[in-house]
Amino acid sequence: MAQPAPRQSAQAQNQKPEQKQALHDGPPPNAWLLALEFRAFWEFGALLPAWPKLARAPRGDGHGVVVFPGLSANDGSTMPLRRYLDALGYATSGWKQGFNFGPRAGVLEAARAQVTRAFADSGRKVSLIGWSLGGVYARELAKEFPHMVRGVITLGTPFGGSHRSTNAWRIYELASGRKVALESANYDLPAAPPVPTTSIYSRSDGIVAWQGSVQKPAPHNPHTENVEVIASHVGLGVNPSAWWAVADRLAQAEGNWQAFERKGTFFHGLIYPDPARAA
């Protein structure tokens, strides 16, 4: 049965083809980086010794946070991060759609309804966090509903690269039943949402070429940034340095955005490399 074409954001609909940003079209991470994805178990284990520091992260103000999982993952994969954010004082929610097998029929509609409902129930803008493919959902939803979204944080999301610069595109096509090239043509994925946006990425990501997770300067939105951490792709959602960055970004007062400050964070010189390297 034919599936309906996904809705384009107003930003993408109004953008002329020559205005779209160029995609990074380099190769995917090599076999060595792919093999290093097994360190995700160590990253998860590092949460315990890092907890005394993580517990001192800025407290939340109770606003809603929706967290979208990566490809072939479900809400169980984001539960540790959500429980951490709950402990800091946020009202977190998973995406509540089981395993993420891509934007199949009804998926995007349900995600839109969830954001709309969270905004209506609280009367406050919600923050969106997305891991890998989940970050694409978060960014595109923020483009559609900027009046409902407070900010976007992505973890290893390949919004700025060709599908061939990842090691997961074949899995995506198999799981979703959709062609990546045709799917991405419906959106201007590299364009930043019109809300504060943070891309957390790793140069040692074994799934997504890191260049595809770097947000280029956005003339329409100066409140964008890239935060580099040392992590695997699979471990980004349980990496202590990523958690600290997420907590720091969420704690900013609405309307008072400031770029991530590496100095003063624990072991900042070691776990948060110089941002100039992303240029």
Image (tube, helix red, strand yellow):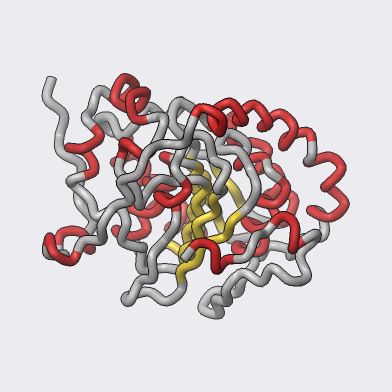
Residue at horizontal 78 percent and vertical 41 percent from the top: 47
* Res 124 visible: no
Drawn side of residue 30 relative to residue 202, left or right? left
Drawn side of residue 232 relative to residue 240, left or right? left
Residue at horizontal 12 percent and vertical 60 percent from the top: 17
Q: Residue 31, relative to residue 22: is it above or below? A: above
List x then y, in percent, for residue 189. 30, 52
Drawn side of residue 193 relative to residue 15, left or right? right
List x then y, in percent, for residue 38. 64, 26
List x then y, in percent, for residue 30. 48, 32
Residue at horizontal 59 percent and vertical 56 percent from the top: 228
Q: Residue 101, relative to residue 117: is it above or below? A: above
Instruction: Give the position of the N terminus as an image quadrant.
Output: top left
| Residue at the extreme bottom | 256
In the image, 66 versus 204, the foreground residue is 204
List x then y, in percent, for residue 132. 46, 41
Q: Residue 130, relative to residue 152: is it above or below? A: above
